[in-house]
């Protein structure tokens, strides 16, 4: 019998996106999968609308917003109790190609040392352009490298591509890998927790792979103007925590050099006439401060966009 896959889809106040994602999952051609919807304590009518549209769907309602890490961890635990051999984590702002699961499972069977396998991620509104094929860390710039981001899609990509870091929009993991490596670190709350997972997977002796024949479509914006102030806070704070957990001595040195440069750049932004630039600078320094103070998990600051 084919390996059982449980899809874990996390929703928070985005029922329209989630319903479209779930509709795409109904077209998956893989013979042995279930779908689990995790609602991260939405404050709107998400659960009612989703249950009305999919009355047989298994729905797990969290009592609080646990972020990407905590919300998905709750889903993973439930998926394992449902008998999953493989767990496929999906952002709710994606749609899934019908053959994606078949291709991901094929790669797991073909590559016995696979730890985390991700599909090729194309833009939802431009199926000819890459959103992500995986990447590596840029310690100097305090973020992942661009990788194949914005490249035109091509049939020439290898079937399996080893990567250091995979995009958290869609990740498949085996029961064995989860038992050995563990779940997401909930101190991140959101941002860089999947990179930490990938590094932990590598240290445990697994490979992180992109399966180029498996495809999803992601609604991520192509403009950095949509990079919110709160996102900037989490990205800054969490990268420093990620570095503490995963960087070598030389990588720590690169990060410190990059931190000095970025701090000078953001200090200048605090004098900008653009109010949003000033808010972004404030979020950056708050992220550094909260990391140093050990204030992890959900942000307790009232940032505006």
Image: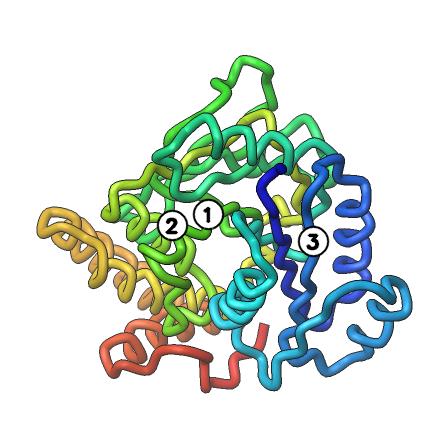
The mark nearer the N terminus, 3 or 2, is 3
Residue 174 badge: 1
Q: Residue 271: in sight, yes or no? A: no
Query: Residue at horizontal 52%, vertical 37%?
Result: 132
Q: Specify whether residue 4 is in view.
A: yes
Secondary structure state at the residue bearing disc 3: strand
Write the residue at 45% across / 80% down.
299
Q: Residues within 10 Å of mark 3 (few under 14, many from 20)?
A: some
Give the mark nearest the N terminus, 1 or 3: 3
Identified at 32% across, 55% down, the residue is 180
Q: Residue furthest right?
A: 52
The answer for how far apart the CA atoms under marks 1 and 3 are is: 15 Å
Quadrant location of the C terminus in the rendered image: bottom right
State whether residue 254 is above or below residue 72. above
Q: Secondary structure at mark 1?
A: strand
Residue farthest along the left direction in this orientation: 249
Residue 230 versus residue 172: which sits nearer the camera? 172
Q: Which residue is mark 2?
A: 177
Tell me the number on the disc at residue 34. Answer: 3
Figure check: 206 above or below 291:
above
Tag 1: Cα neighbours inside 10 Å, few (<14), some, or many (≥20)?
Answer: many
Q: Residue 197, how many percent across, how many down?
A: 36, 54
Q: Position of residue 2 (x, y in %)?
A: 62, 37
What is the quadrant of residue 131 in the picture? top right
Name the one closer to the observer, 300 or 168. Answer: 168
Check whether the beta carbons of the residues at disc 1 and disc 2 lie within 8 A of each other: yes
Left or right: where 168 falls relative to 52: left
Q: Residue 113 is drawn in which quadrant?
A: top left
Q: From this view, report whether residue 173 is shown above or below residue 228.
A: above
Q: Is residue 67 found left or right of 222 in the rendered image?
A: left
């Amino acid at each position: 019998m084919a390996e059982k896959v449980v899809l874990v889809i996390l929703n928070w106040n985005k029922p329209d996106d989630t319903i479209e994602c779930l509709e795409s999952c109904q077209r998956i051609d893989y013979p042995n999968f279930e779908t689990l919807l995790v609602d991260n304590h939405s404050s709107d009518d998400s659960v009612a609308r989703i249950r009305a549209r999919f009355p047989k769907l298994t729905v797990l309602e969290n009592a609080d917003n646990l972020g990407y890490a905590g919300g998905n961890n709750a889903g993973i635990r439930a998926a394992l109790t449902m008998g999953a051999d493989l767990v496929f984590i999906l952002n709710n702002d994606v749609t899934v190609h019908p053959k994606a699961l078949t291709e991901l499972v094929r790669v797991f069977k073909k590559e016995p040392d696979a730890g985390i396998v991700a599909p090729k991620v194309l833009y939802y509104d431009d199926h000819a352009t890459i959103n992500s094929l995986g990447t590596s860390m840029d310690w100097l710039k305090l973020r992942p490298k661009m990788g194949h981001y914005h490249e035109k899609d091509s049939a020439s990509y290898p079937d399996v591509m080893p990567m250091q870091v995979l995009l958290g929009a869609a990740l498949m993991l085996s029961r064995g890998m989860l038992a050995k490596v563990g779940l997401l670190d909930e101190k991140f709350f959101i941002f860089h927790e999947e990179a930490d997972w990938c590094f932990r997977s590598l240290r445990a002796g697994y490979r992180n792979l992109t399966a180029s024949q498996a495809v999803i479509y992601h609604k991520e914006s192509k403009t950095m103007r949509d990079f919110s102030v709160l996102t900037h806070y989490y990205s800054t704070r969490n990268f420093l925590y990620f570095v503490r957990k995963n960087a070598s001595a030389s990588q720590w040195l690169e990060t410190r050099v990059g931190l000095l440069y970025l701090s000078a750049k953001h200090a200048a932004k605090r004098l900008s006439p653009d109010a949003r630039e000033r808010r972004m600078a404030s979020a950056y320094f708050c992220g550094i401060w909260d990391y140093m103070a050990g204030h992890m998990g959900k942000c307790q600051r009232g940032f505006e966009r």
